[in-house]
Image: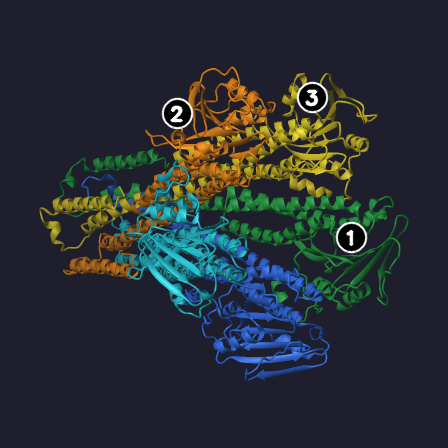
Chain colours: A yellow, B green, C blue, D cyan, E orange
Amino acid sequence: MTSIKHRSKKAGLAPGTLIHMGRDKGGATRVDLVQYDETRLEKRPVTALDECLIKKGIPGVTWINVEGLSDVEVLRHFGSCYGIHPLVLEDILATDQRPKAADYGEYLYVVLKMLGVDDGTGEIKSEQVSLVLGQNYLISFQEGLEGDVFEQVRARLVNEKARLRAMGPDFLLHALLDVIVDHYFLILEKLADRIEDVEDELIDNPTTATVQTIYRLKRQMLFLHKAFWPLREVASSLQRRDSQLIRDTTVIYLRDLYDHTVQVLDTLETLREMLSGMLDIYLSSVSNRLNEVMKVLTIIATIFMPLSFVVGWYGMNFKHMPELEWSYGYPVVFVICLVLAGGMLVYFKNKRWL
Amino acid sequence: MTSIKHRSKKAGLAPGTLIHMGRDKGGATRVDLVQYDETRLEKRPVTALDECLIKKGIPGVTWINVEGLSDVEVLRHFGSCYGIHPLVLEDILATDQRPKAADYGEYLYVVLKMLGVDDGTGEIKSEQVSLVLGQNYLISFQEGLEGDVFEQVRARLVNEKARLRAMGPDFLLHALLDVIVDHYFLILEKLADRIEDVEDELIDNPTTATVQTIYRLKRQMLFLHKAFWPLREVASSLQRRDSQLIRDTTVIYLRDLYDHTVQVLDTLETLREMLSGMLDIYLSSVSNRLNEVMKVLTIIATIFMPLSFVVGWYGMNFKHMPELEWSYGYPVVFVICLVLAGGMLVYFKNKRWL
Amino acid sequence: MTSIKHRSKKAGLAPGTLIHMGRDKGGATRVDLVQYDETRLEKRPVTALDECLIKKGIPGVTWINVEGLSDVEVLRHFGSCYGIHPLVLEDILATDQRPKAADYGEYLYVVLKMLGVDDGTGEIKSEQVSLVLGQNYLISFQEGLEGDVFEQVRARLVNEKARLRAMGPDFLLHALLDVIVDHYFLILEKLADRIEDVEDELIDNPTTATVQTIYRLKRQMLFLHKAFWPLREVASSLQRRDSQLIRDTTVIYLRDLYDHTVQVLDTLETLREMLSGMLDIYLSSVSNRLNEVMKVLTIIATIFMPLSFVVGWYGMNFKHMPELEWSYGYPVVFVICLVLAGGMLVYFKNKRWL
Amino acid sequence: MTSIKHRSKKAGLAPGTLIHMGRDKGGATRVDLVQYDETRLEKRPVTALDECLIKKGIPGVTWINVEGLSDVEVLRHFGSCYGIHPLVLEDILATDQRPKAADYGEYLYVVLKMLGVDDGTGEIKSEQVSLVLGQNYLISFQEGLEGDVFEQVRARLVNEKARLRAMGPDFLLHALLDVIVDHYFLILEKLADRIEDVEDELIDNPTTATVQTIYRLKRQMLFLHKAFWPLREVASSLQRRDSQLIRDTTVIYLRDLYDHTVQVLDTLETLREMLSGMLDIYLSSVSNRLNEVMKVLTIIATIFMPLSFVVGWYGMNFKHMPELEWSYGYPVVFVICLVLAGGMLVYFKNKRWL
Amino acid sequence: MTSIKHRSKKAGLAPGTLIHMGRDKGGATRVDLVQYDETRLEKRPVTALDECLIKKGIPGVTWINVEGLSDVEVLRHFGSCYGIHPLVLEDILATDQRPKAADYGEYLYVVLKMLGVDDGTGEIKSEQVSLVLGQNYLISFQEGLEGDVFEQVRARLVNEKARLRAMGPDFLLHALLDVIVDHYFLILEKLADRIEDVEDELIDNPTTATVQTIYRLKRQMLFLHKAFWPLREVASSLQRRDSQLIRDTTVIYLRDLYDHTVQVLDTLETLREMLSGMLDIYLSSVSNRLNEVMKVLTIIATIFMPLSFVVGWYGMNFKHMPELEWSYGYPVVFVICLVLAGGMLVYFKNKRWL
């Protein structure tokens, strides 16, 4: 919901105006640089952005990771060094982007959501990641939440024999996208767990809270759907070899990425259908319980109302009520009451209410 | 709803017949002219429409803004000066147009809704905007509601270094469309606020009024859907370079506009799904409360009906009722009543009704 | 519904067998002829169909309007004179046709529904109109209901300066289609009025009759949907210049017709979604009222059942009931009853049931 | 449902294995042969299948109709004589085929459902019909239910001047398909009748039986949808001239067939939507009646519970109850009761419950 | 659900990392080899995987069946022998694959679910099957559940005259796919049986358990839908002759396979629609029963509340109650009570509540 609210801040500004729209998710902007080829690997934080970090024609692959978008100057620096269009810079800052891939000839721009789980609270964290792929470099921009899902890629880079080291920046792009999509399965797993809990609750003891949980889960799935659905188109376009920055050897891996994306969507769709089926169960179970309650009430009333009438009858104060004088009057009324009550019980037994 | 009603006024008239169909939203028709290039900016209101305002081959960009459609003669003037087809003029007057973009070779016609929020009442105002883009001019027609969303564009025009000043009328077209679409986010933000309010209401204290609010919100979204959905096709066709009036440098900006349009639709769709989920919650909460009410009733009846029977029993006036004579009769009935009531309470406890 | 029933009469007959399938909507078949060009206009009823009315190569436009389909011979006459395929003649007679446009080279066949409102009863009247467009003629077939929507076209024809007079029969085709589609807006306006009435009813005092009205409106919309939906394809195919009988100057008008068709469908869709939302409101309002009723019952029962127990208690006839002898017994019971009732009221107040 | 069960008998057999899968719908297999051209018509039952019935190059059209699929040898005979692929023979026997048209070059295979109404019971009968169209022959296979819908085609064949006699086997194919599709309208008519009955029942006196009827109708429509939907694709592919066995003169008739198919689907869809609307009405009517019942109960309880309390009050046996001694005590209580009851009635009147 | 959970184990690993993700469904990995051509058939278990089993240019067809995926080394062996891409090996191990067919030039990879029914428990067993088709070989990988559906194919291979023996490995691929899809019908048959049981239950005695059964069936159908839906695309792509490994003679059989797949989906869809209709019936039947219960309660209360009031009235202890002294007071009250009760019964009779 918050994303809708921040977007309106920009209404009417010139396109390409650089304003950081998201909540400020981190502290200072941090820039890390990794340069590698098959034989060499160099990692260092970048402290000063005086001159352009990557020169044309430099061999190997350069990966620059930017954490935190609050410092607009950093973005401007990269924009002028690598000829990134102001609209792309604007998109990097607008942290409610729909996932997309756009080919600008000189570079390829991919934006998507990185989802993670907070180790402490177990909450889902969402962060926008923008990737700019050039001839011999890849720049990744994160919103600046602590931690990211790229650790495993960094670990693989250290290994000299990793395929990653032998290939170009397009393969690094695939590696980063792949690890992001893989983490989507973690989120879906968490959701599946909670849906199973709700299922158990539905059968044991459904309450209004159960419905609210279902609603909240639905809302989360709406959010995930919004984040996942356009990704299919992104992966599909990358794999179609539209851009010359994607080498042929990488295409087969991007096809694999596409398969994963489709699977993520399939799983999400299955979970959604399961959820919507649950509401039907809930409603039918509520209706059933109402039926049960009403049966109890009706049985009680149907047994005791006639009985009360009978005893009220002989509580009347008429002078001339012959039964009152009879010596067997009292036991006869007792029998009448027993028969009435028993008859009712048999009737309800036949109606299967008991 | 009103739009449907006005449309029928025209049934059977020759195509191209100029009749103002909308409610009269403003007073007199006002024409404003802005002429600019990189070095020069001239603004003036136009009082007399004796001769054509723009000559062929005039350098720079001319932007004519027409407010108010009640004076059909003004339209006819523009029609004959710039060769605008009578059907286009008719469309400008028919203020219930579906958003569309049509290429007439010499000029490009774009029509869409401009939405704004009234500063005083907070109500949503809607107005049809028609844009006619020619080789060196852009004419915009508004229905004439006070105020428009173009102020920010006018402000940017004043700035000599603005990209807007250096580019053609197609870039001005983009600027106007962009600011209109940006204001859609404001409307969506307002809707999101109200949906959040309804959500809170649903959990705290849902009433029939809540359902009526949901229904009204749904209706507004139907209206917005009708206004936004065709826009996607409009933005897409503009960006596809179908018209020679769109310069290559502007295309990248129109692609950005297309992205915004898709995002507007996405957000609207998300809000709609949230709303429809709410009705389910409401219904299940109503069912639940009914259950609660019925439980209270059943518990009361189930406890007091047997008790009333017992005390009624000893209110009978039979001559021969031995218990009445016993000295412990009264306390025994007291104990029986206690046990009956206690037993019922335990029963309901076990059924988790309490 | 009736259309389904008449169709089965024809099962198994040879294709092209001419049988009038619809209800007989009018009396005798009437043929009217209008011949015009820019300078000349001649109108006359045709009484005898001895020879073909239009010769090849005759200048100007000939419009033959046939009212009433009961006389199959008339159709056969037109079939043999202008080489109309027997299947087309069969379609003209089968008055439950789906709207369509089919190009037979020599002529173009368009069939659709003409809807009107009966001035007296306000009922919607529906009639099938078939249009056969040739090189220099247009033949229109109506089912023969009194009155049609073409009067305005006839009135425009009288005017010598009308564009209609200067153009070919394809422009006449457009004029007739346009006036038919324009009248659809009248029908939609009527529906919108009734929907607004239902909305008011829903909020004021919803009854079962309201639901039945909603259902009837839905059914009417199903009928309209069936009549309107294929029209979009018809208008689209006409505008695509598939036929050589459509001149280039007419195409722009047919594009306008297409826009109107889309708008008709859009409006119908909006009305349908509004209707389906209403049923939800109705159901939730019924549930709410049930809740209200049950609350009243529960409050009454919860207050008076314990009270009745108390007074029943002291109606017992035990010999030894000390309270009965106490001089303050009666007032104490009075106070107990007051406290019980008051306590219940406070309890319901807290539960917000009051 | 039965079709699902028979299909599994074949699991794992080699493709082209000939096993009759359907219920045995008839007795012995019967083969009838009709040979005709413009001048000649010969009909005879075939008793022995020693040699191939149709030689290549025989003039005129040969139509072989096979009734009953229980004798697999007959199928094998036709397979070897006319080079029909084993998979096609298998499809002919598998009587739960989805309607389809497949072009095998030498011949064209069309399979669909023939629906009829049993004259006695009024039940719908369904039978699979396979049609194999060759250069100069057409073979039709039926499951063997008594009677078929082809009688009318046979009658038309007798007529020497019928177009059917002058044209090739592809026109005969159209004639058979056309008569089958025409009979679909009969089925839809029956359904429409029953739906109208259900509508009346819904308004007069809806019961659980009504819902079960709606469900059964829905199920029948599911079956029809399965039978009709693929037919659209069949008719469309035939009309597209994909096969060289379809002559140009027949194409226009197949286009007509396609139109009928679309109309069948349209009508079915309309009936389905009507049915689904009915369930909503039923549910709302049930809710309404519950409301009515509850109102009666509440009114009764609200009137008599306070009254019972009052009379119970004066049934107490306290020694000191001054009212009991008053000479106007009894009439005063009478008035109190009248006022209480009257007040309640006014209250319910105001609430519009009465 | 379990499949979602295992997938997350792999998040962040390098693509092509071989980890067995599924539950361990069997014991040791077993490899069986069948080599055949028209004259020869050799079957043997493979115990040692020292060298590649199939040499290039070996005549005839080699079918290697691998049961059990726990031994990753076996996979690696096949990968290096036949040049299978690491990503394919990874897919073979990841046992939650979406069915797909991918052409890698040298070989074709097809993955899908094999469903079977456990003979003992009647439970549905699911297992992933991967098929790798090469120029002269086919390798099938199963998860290792005991038993498979291929027995019938093995039996057909023994028969020297079987078409299977005369054709290439692509025909074997078809045979395996065909038998897998044929077994889907068995599963659907089981589901159809259970749905019919639920239908009977719904009409006889619907309980909450019925709804839970419906929900469980829905969930199973979701699973089947996920397994079947992509298969359509698989069969369609195989039949389109995209790969050169598919010979022309096999294409017609693959088209047949495609038809079966479509039929499987059709049947599943029909079953799903039947199920969703059932829930509506259930809800309406529950509502109806509630109505019945409430009518009983209301009838009882409406009859006995006024009666109780009457007898309570004459239980009052006023000194001056003239009726009590009347000698006909008692019989008159008796008659009043009879009339009251009778009147109520007539009233309910008229309301059709009885």
Q: Nearer the viewer, mark 2 or mark 1?
A: 2
For disc 3, the marked residue is A166
For disc 2, the marked residue is E146
Q: Residues within 10 Å of mark 2 (few under 14, many from 20)?
A: few
Q: Amino acid at mark 1?
A: Gln
- Chain bearing tag 1 is B
C-alpha distance separating marks 3 and 1: 46 Å
- Label 2, secondary structure: give it: loop
- The circle on residue B244 is 1
D51 and C316: which one is in front?
A: D51
In the figure, residue B106 lies in which quadrant?
bottom right
User: Percent position (x, y) of residue A134?
Assistant: 75, 31
Q: Residues within 10 Å of mark 3 (few under 14, many from 20)?
A: some
Q: Do marks 2 and 1 share a subunit? A: no
User: Percent position (x, y) of residue D53?
Assistant: 38, 54
* Above/below status of E338 relative to E130: below
- Chain bearing tag 3 is A
C-alpha distance separating marks 3 and 2: 43 Å
E149 and D78: which one is in front?
A: D78
- Asked if one can make out residue C29 in the rendered structure from this viewpoint, the answer is yes
* Above/below status of E139 relative to E329: above
Q: Amino acid at mark 2?
A: Glu
Q: Residues within 10 Å of mark 1 (few under 14, many from 20)?
A: few
Q: Is residue A237 left or right of residue D329?
A: right
Q: Do marks 3 and 2 share a subunit? A: no
